[in-house]
Amino acid sequence: MAIVRLALPVAAHQLFDYWLPSGLAVALGSAVIAKIGRRRLAGVVAEIIASSEVAPERLLPIDEVVAGIPPLPDDVCALARFVAAYYQEPIGLCFAQALPPFVVARRAAVVSVPGATGLVKHALNADQRTAVSAVLPQPLEFAPSLVQGVTGSGKTEVYLAAAARLIAAGRQALLLVPEINLTPQLVERIVAALPGVRTAVLHSRLAAGERRRQWLAAATGDAQLIVGTRLAVFAPLPRLGLIVVDEEQDASFKQQEGVRYHARDVAIYRARLRDVPIVLGSATPSLESYAQATRGRYRWLKLPQRAVLQAALPEVRLVPNRASGSVEGIGSALQHAIAARLARNEQVLLFINRRGYAPSLLCAACGWKAMCPRCDARLVVHRDAGRLRCHHCSHAGNIPTACPECGNQDLLPLGFGTQRLERAVAELYPAARIVRVDRDSTRRKDSFAAMRNAIAAGEVDIMIGTQMLAKGHDFPRLTLVGVLGADNALYSGEFRATERLFTLLVQVSGRAGRGALAGEVLVQTDFADHPVYAALVAHDYDRFAAALLAERKSLGLPPFAHLALLSAEAKRPAALDTFLSTAATRGRAIAAAHGSECEVFSPVPAALPRRANLVRAQVLAQSPNRRALQAFLPLWRDELERIEERSVRWSLDVDPIGFA
C-alpha cells in the first residue's frame, strides 16, 4: 500500500498520512483532495513514504487527484517548507499559498492587455544601460542587486530591459509589485517596451477562474513575464531566470494575516534556490536592503537622474502649517501656488493621508469626543454620508445633532480628511475640475481607472487623495504637489515612522515635474528643522538613511536586531494577562536553558489596546543573532500551544514591520 504525506490547509504544524488507492497516480507536489474529519480539503503531496507510524486501519484514502493542475515543482515545495520553518506558520497553509483556486478547468491563457496609447519609448541612458548589464551576471547565477533610483529615473525600464534579455534567451521573469491596482500604467509600459511578450498577471482580486488561468500560464511556461503582488512569489515558473521586486520597501509586501511572510525576503530565498539574479528597486530602499548594500552583500546600482532629459527633480519648499490666511488648513502659500498652476492650465495634487471629512468629532462645551464603542479609537466623520465610522472595526452610526453628554449642538469636526479638503478647495477655486481619490471614492468597480483616465486626458485640474495617488502614476502636466498633515506621523511611537514618512513624501513628491514642465512641492509643517524634511528638501536619502541606521544600531533595532512579535487578543483581560505572562515566563526559561541570545520582554498593550471588543497585547522576543532567534522560536511556539487558555487567540509574527 502506497503512503503519501500531505500538507493540508489547517492550523497544524505537521503533515498527514493517507494511503493511495490503486489507479491514482501522484508525484511530489501533486494537488489532491482528502478528508480530514468531516471536511474535504485540497492538499499537496509533500512526501511519498514506504510506511506510516499511523496504524493501517486508521489511515484514510486520498479521494482524488485534482485534474488540470500540474504538480508543484521542487523549488516551490522547498519555498513552502522554508516559509513554514522561518515564519513559524502551519506547513499546510504555506503549501496552499502556491495553489490556484480550484474551479472548473479551462485552457491556460495569458492576459490580454490594452495598447500603450500615448506612451513614448525612450532609449536607455548610460546609467540605465550600466544597471541592466550589472544585474545580469554571466553566467547567470544568484546575485542580489539593489537599484536605487530617484523618482522618474526609469527603474521600470531597467527591469523590463533586463527581463527582455532573459526572455529572448528562453527564460521567464517574475516582477513583483506592491499593489497592482495602484500601478495601472505598468501593463501599458510592458506592452510598449516588450511587444509580443506573453504576460500573466497574478493578484488576489482576480476572479477565481481568471486567476487559475493566469497561474496555469505561468506554471506551464506559456507566460514569459509574470507580474503580480506578493502571492505571485509562489507561482510555479519552470524557466525562471530573473526576479524583480519593485518598490521593495513597501509594507504591502508583508502579509499581515493568515500566513505572515515578507514577499521580498521570500523572493530572495527563491532566487537563491533557483540560482538566478534578483533585483530590488526603490527610490528609498528599506533600511534592511540599504544596510545589505552598504556591507557589499548586494550589488548597489544608482540612478541619480530622471530618465527624461527635460525633467528635473522638483523643488521642495517647507511652508508654515498654521500661517495667517489659512482656509480649512490650506495655507496662503499653497493657495497662491494652486492659483498660479490653474492659470497656466497645469495640474495640482493635494495629498493628505486621511480619508473621510475629519478624524474626530468634538463637543465644544464639555469636551466629549465621538469614540468607537468597540475600539479604543475615535470615530471618523464622513459628512457626505452623514455617518461616523471606525476605520478599525467598520462600526458606523449617524452623526449626532447634539452632544450625547450635555446636549450642546455646537459639535466641531477636528482635523482634516480628504472630504473636508475637497469641499474647501471647491469653495476656493469654484471653476476648477476636482477629483477625490481615496478608498471611499473608488469602491465601485473600475472607478479608479476612470479617474486615472480623466486625469491623464487633462479633464481634471486638482487631484485630492491619499497614498493611492502617491506611486505608480505619471501625469506630465502635474507640476504642483501640496502635502498636508505630514506632521502627524512624527508623533507616532512606532520606530519605523520617520522611515515610512520619508518614503511616502518622496513618492508623492515624485509625481511633480515628470515631463518637460518644472515641478514644485510645498509641504506644510510645524517642524521645518526636522531631519526628515531637511533630507526631503535636499533629495538626500543617503544621508537620511545613514542617520537612521546609526540610530537603529544604538537602540538595537532592525536591521541590527531580529524580532518576533507574539500578539494576542481576548474578550477577558484576565485571560489575556495570564496567557501572555505565562508565555513570557516560559520564553525566558527556554532562552536561559539553551544559553540563547534571545531576550523576551514583558507583555505590553498593543498600539490599539481594544479593537472590535477584544483586548489586545503583545510580547516581543529580540535577538542580535538571526540563527539564535530561529532556534528559539520553534521551542517557544511549542510552549505557547501548551498554555491552557483557549479563550485567547494568538499569533507569532517573525520580522514584524510594526507593532499595531
Image: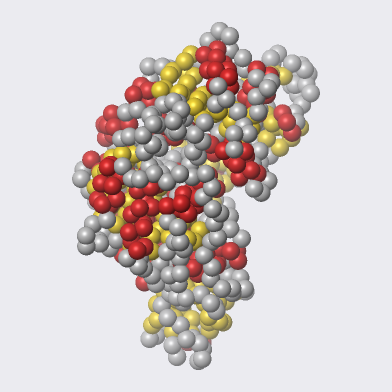
Residue 151 shows in the view? yes
Q: In the figure, 573 relative to 263: above or below? A: above
Q: In the figure, 310 relative to 3: above or below? A: above
Which of the colour schemes (rainbow, by chain, secondary structure, one colour) is used? secondary structure
Q: Is residue 568 left or right of residue 455?
A: left
Residue 344: which quarter of the image? Answer: top right
Q: In the figure, 315 relative to 577: above or below? A: above
Viewer-closest of 615 and 340: 340
Count of marks overlaid on the render: 0
Viewer-closest of 191 and 549: 191
Viewer-closest of 590 and 416: 416
Q: Locate residue 636, reporting x and y percent.
A: 38, 54
x 65%, y 24%: residue: 432
x 55%, y 60%: residue: 112
Q: Locate residue 591, reporting x and y percent.
A: 30, 50
Residue 55 shows in the view? no
x 38%, y 86%: residue: 50
Q: Is residue 66 left or right of residue 422?
A: left
Q: Locate residue 75, reporting x and y percent.
A: 36, 68
x 45%, y 39%: residue: 659
Quarter of the N terminus within the rendering: bottom left
Q: Locate residue 459, reporting x and y percent.
A: 63, 34
Q: In the figure, 124 relative to 542: above or below? A: below
Q: Is residue 632 left or right of residue 68?
A: left
